[in-house]
Amino acid sequence: MVRIALAQVDPCVGDVTGNAALVLEWAARAAEAGAGLVVFPEMVLTGYPIEDLALRDSFARAADAALAEVTSGLVARGLGDLTVVLGTLGRSALPGREGRPTNRAVVVRGGAVVATYDKHHLPNYGVFDEYRIFAPGDAGCVVEVPRAGGGTARAGIVVCEDIWRDGGPLPAMGDADLLLVLNGSPYEEGKVGVRAELAARRAAEAGAPVVYVNLVGGQDDLVFDGGSFVVGVDGTVLARAPQFAPHLLVWDLPDDGATPGRLAPPMDPDAEVYAAVVTGLAGYVRKNGFRSVVLGLSGGIDSALVAAMAADAVGGENVVGVSMPSRHSSQHSKDDAEDLARRIGADYRVQPIEPLAAAFHGEMDLPGIAGENLQARIRGVILMGLSNVEGHLVLATGNKSELAVGYSTIYGDAVGGFAPLKDVDKSRVWALARWRNQAALDAGEIPPIPESSITKPPSAELAPGQMDTDSLPPYHLLDEVLDAYVEHAEGRDELLARGFDAAVVDRVLALVDRAEWKRRQYPPGPKVTALAFGRDRRLPVTNRWREPKGDPR
């Protein structure tokens, strides 16, 4: 029998010293749990993704020093007999690729590196840009791991993308008793099931259980959800770690057959997306040295949801909510903002903007939309001022639907260091708010979001009687068109063939195409869908292409 520990940890990109300490800490936990083999995620020593840090010799030397600290540190802690598999930055020795960085897995035992494996398949799609950075490996890796009762088990090692490609390095594994897969697989909705199905296929091909260990935590616009698991040759999930939390999952590889382990329950879809955003926000705040956040509280649904998420991420006492009413702000909106702050325990402040707006108008003639934008920009100045004085991270509260059609004011409500709802469309905003309130009720707690913030018609309240539907289609319709056009790259003809009204299609497509420059300047936010604005979707700002207005096919 081999007791295997899957160390689902949250490293920080660039903190090689801290990451080495993290590996040693969790290796000790694995040994305490009786494990003889502990597996860490992809590039755990450097953090992931490291992007162009991989190209710096100074960074490579630091990664090598961190690996040396791990190998010597294991021996110093009496863990020399423990087999540790982890990811780090390597250097290729292949002809024509000498010295180029590699995405490497290493096997450490007895105070030395006993085997290495360089990732073969380098993803170059979506958020991944590894082909530009790394050199691929071409050799397999199978290591002998001592069994508790004597003898050894053969463990094949691959890294993440290597199991996503048919015809990958699996055939070289031969008669391996298990397959270890080191992963830095970012979250997107629906991916959990895809991973399990993929691993089941590879287990059948290899004729051995697959041990899949994944990163957890937030890194800029990526969220790693963990969810590490073991799947048997017959496709049965034998053990599974929870999502969105560091965890040590222990599973026994028996001498014969397969042993079921601990199975964390699957998450509700809304719970999963909500947790992904909170994890991304918490990681961004902590890893960038902030202790608190500040945002504008309008009384509307977007700021209410962001505030609730922020309270879950960093604690309500570390959330500063600022109401910045103008002469167009309704009393119910001001009341809802105050009620929300009280529910989550936020530091609530009121800073009217009317005197500031009047001063501008006294010096400049800013009618119509210019005057509306002025109000948003004054609010942005207030939030950034508080950030400068008190050290809070400013949160932008716009959602994906608004970002798609440019329904935000650049240098106004678009200011901030992080945008939690950047990849959450308006329809999902309402769903997540309802889910969060219900979760509170189920736990016997006060729902964080006032019901009126959820049920009232959305409005920017920048003009008398203004409603979002004055300039946009109803959000349920808008989001359907945006999903087809943005996420599935369907053109005008395809949209009309679906039955969408031509006027709605033309209006939405024109808004989306015109807003690319705004999206380029928007803060980062956590990716939760298959296609998020940013690294997933790259379009030129200067671009005269428009969808032709032909007949449906």
Image (cartoon, helix red, strand yellow):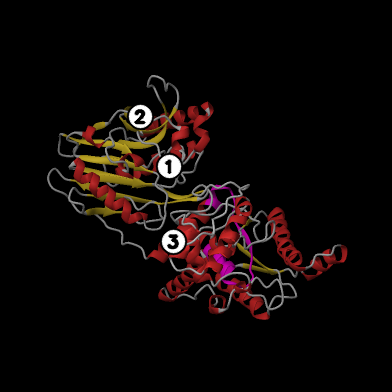
Relative to 467, residue 202 above or below: above
Position of residue 348 measured from the top left corner of the image (x, y, whole percent): 65, 69
User: Which residue corresponds to mark 2?
Assistant: 137
Residue placed under numbered mark 3 in the picture: 273
Give whichever of discs 3 and 2 has the lower sequence position. 2
Identify the residue at horizontal 41%, vertical 61% (top origin).
272
Residue 419 appears in which quarter of the rendering? bottom right
Label 2 near label 1: C-beta < 8 Å?
no
Amino acid under disc 1: Leu
| Dot 3 amino acid type | Val
Please check the rendered image and state whether residue 296 is part of the magenta-colored stretch, yes or no: yes
Spatial CA distance of label 1 from label 2 is 27 Å
Label 1 or label 3, whichever lies nearer to me, is 3
Start-end of magenta stretch: 284-310
Q: How many marks?
A: 3
Residue 495 in view, yes or no: yes
